[in-house]
Image (cartoon, rainbow, N blue to C red):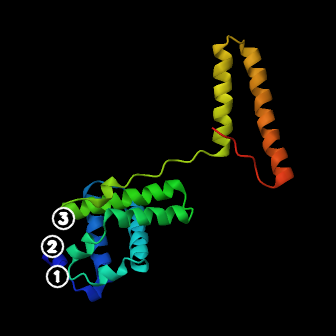
Amino acid sequence: MRKLQNIISSNMHNYQSILEIHFVEFLRASGSSAKTQKNYRCDLNHFFQWIFSSEIVQPLKNSSSLNEFLIVLTVPKLNNYKDFLLQKSVPTATINRRLSSIRMFFSACQHFGLMSDNPAKSISNVPKQITQVEKKEKILQEFIKELEYEGASKKTISNYASDIKQFLEWLESAHTNNLKDPIRLPL
């Protein structure tokens, strides 16, 4: 581990390689599957590519040790990465996996004594966005619950549910055909 402390800043990309090796070692020791290891490693590479291409490269170039390199990766910088992913319209599940990978990476850094605190543990996942189909289903289920509460028969509920489902589909189709912009159902 002492080798990690003495890497010179001109070899910044070596930081990535060394950290990646130790990260995979940490994942194996924690029982992660081969697929998880591969995905987390790819996520870590994506994170490092973002670091090396972003505005935070300058402070990193002044790092004289791996610890200094890691200390520059603060909560605000991690939030910048999260914002970058959101701006690029990366799917929510991918963003959350990448954030999980980063949290695990910093846990590995703590495990190896490279950091005393995990700056990524305060970075929360992005809430899952509800799709139009899920919105329609939610409206329909709420309507069915209301009918059940009112004491409607199963046959009445079935007929009304079918009518509402067809109406919602027609409404979306009519709006799409007229305005070329599908209607967004409020919740």
Mark 3 lies on a secondary structure that is loop
Along the line of sight, the residue nearer the viewer: 2 or 21: 2
Q: Are marks 3 and 1 in contact (CB under 8 Å)?
A: no
Q: Residues within 10 Å of mark 1 (few under 14, many from 20)?
A: few
Give the x, y percent position of residue 138: 63, 34
Q: Is residue 88 above or below residue 93?
A: below
Question: Which residue is painted at 71% across and 12% down in the image?
Answer: 152
Along the line of sight, the residue nearer the viewer: 123 or 107: 123
Give the x, y percent position of residue 85: 49, 64
Give the x, y percent position of residue 52: 39, 79
User: What's the distance in space between the residues labelled 1 and 2, CA to CA?
Assistant: 10 Å
Which quarter of the picture shows residue 62?
Answer: bottom left
Which numbered disc flags the more N-terminal residue, 3 or 2? Answer: 2
Which residue of the protein is positioned furthest toward the bottom in this rendering? 10
The C terminus, quarter of image = top right
Which numbered disc flags the more N-terminal residue, 3 or 1? Answer: 1
Which numbered disc flags the more N-terminal residue, 1 or 2? Answer: 2
User: What's the distance in space between the residues labelled 3 and 2, CA to CA?
Assistant: 8 Å
Q: Are marks 3 and 2 in contact (CB under 8 Å)?
A: yes
1 vs 2, front mark: 1
Q: Amino acid at mark 3?
A: Phe
Question: Which residue is painted at 42% across and 60% down in the image?
Answer: 98
Mark 2 lies on a secondary structure that is loop
Which residue of the protein is positioned furthest toward the left in this rendering? 2
Q: Amino acid at mark 1?
A: Asn
Count the marks.
3
Question: Which residue is painted at 43% across and 56% down in the image?
Answer: 97
Query: In the drawing, what numbered circle is on residue 1?
Result: 2
The N terminus, quarter of image = bottom left
- Quickly name the residue at label 3: 112
- Quickly name the residue at label 1: 6
Give the x, y percent position of residue 178: 86, 51
